[in-house]
Amino acid sequence: MNVAGKVAKGDSGWLPGMAKGVTQDEFERIAWEQLTELWTQFGSFSEVWLDGGYPLDMLDEMKPKLPLWQPDAVAWNGTQW
């Protein structure tokens, strides 16, 4: 997707003939859809690590969903909750 350091680069940095990358909004939508599937379709988790593998602006969306979708999970690292 041409994302580095949680930032989508879009069309920059691609070699001729390569498909274009995603925008930041597209990247965050894809990441959110993957997180939604993981937290809602794979059973109960005992712990969830929030160690910075996501853009920080997504944290505000994640905070209310974790207790709803994974009520028994303990959140670790990077939450600042």
Image (cartoon, rainbow, N blue to C red):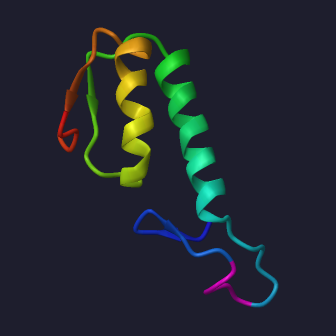
What residue appears at the point 62 percent right and 46 percent down from the top-left corner? 30
Give the residue at the far bottom of this rendering: 16
Task: Say which quadrant the N terminus sits in.
Answer: bottom right
User: Which quadrant holds residue 58?
Assistant: top left
| Vertical order, 68 against 34 (above or below) | above
Residue 12 lies left or right of residue 68; in this view the side is right
User: Which quadrant holds residue 68?
Assistant: top left
Residue 10 lies left or right of residue 61; in this view the side is right
Q: What's the magenta bit mostly, secondary-structure-wise?
A: loop
Q: In the rendered image, is residue 70 in sight?
A: yes
Residue 2 percent across, percent down from the top left: 59, 71
Q: In the rendered image, is residue 54 in sight?
A: no
Residue 81 percent across, percent down from the top left: 19, 33
Magenta-highlighted residues: 11-15
The question of residue 1 being in magenta is answered with: no
What residue appears at the point 65 percent right and 65 percent down from the top-left corner? 23
Residue 71 percent across, percent down from the top left: 33, 10
What residue appears at the point 29 percent right and 51 percent down from the top-left corner? 52
| Vertical order, 36 against 17 (above or below) | above
| Vertical order, 10 against 17 (above or below) | above
What residue appears at the point 69 percent right and 80 percent down from the top-left corner? 11
